[in-house]
Image: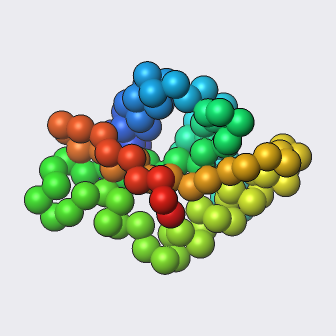
Amino acid sequence: MSTAIGRDAEDRVARYLEQQGYKIVSQNWRTRYCEIDIVASKQKVVWFVEVKYRSSTAQGAGYEYVTDKKLQQMRFAAEFWVQSEKWTGEYRLAVASVDDQAIEMIDDL
């Protein structure tokens, strides 16, 4: 996937989250150790959102491509952010599955 397609998918998800009442804290948060596509907050909970784009769902939705290894990386990145930002509240992981037609959020990781 090209960088431009990935950025567009992340932008679409950020707009979607804002429409759902989330505040975007950061997009493409990166360190030398990890990255987070979108950090958002809603009702005193910080959400770490992995964006997975597929041009179609013919081979499955994007969230189906989140492996155990990717989930482990997401947890590490979330914990890294929590420590670096000194966040003491609740936080959760989510995946936004994006295709050319729709966005689907899976937030029970």
Which residue is drawn at the image coordinates 15% and 50% (left, top)? 56
Whether residue 108 is visible to the viewer of this picture, yes or no, is yes
Which residue is drawn at the image coordinates 75% and 60% (left, top)? 79
Which residue is drawn at the image coordinates 52% and 48% (left, top)? 49
* 51 or 90, nearer to the observer: 90
Image quarter of residue 60: bottom left
- Percent across and percent down for residue 54 are 25, 51
Extreme-left residue of the structure: 58
As drawn, 75 above or below 38? below
Asked if residue 93 lies left or right of residue 90, the reply is left
Extreme-bottom residue of the structure: 68
Which residue is drawn at the image coordinates 41% and 53% (left, top)? 106
As drawn, 34 above or below 30? below
Image quarter of residue 83: bottom right
- Percent across and percent down for residue 44 are 71, 36
As drawn, 70 above or below 37? below
Asked if residue 28 lies left or right of residue 53, the reply is right
* 88 or 48, nearer to the observer: 88
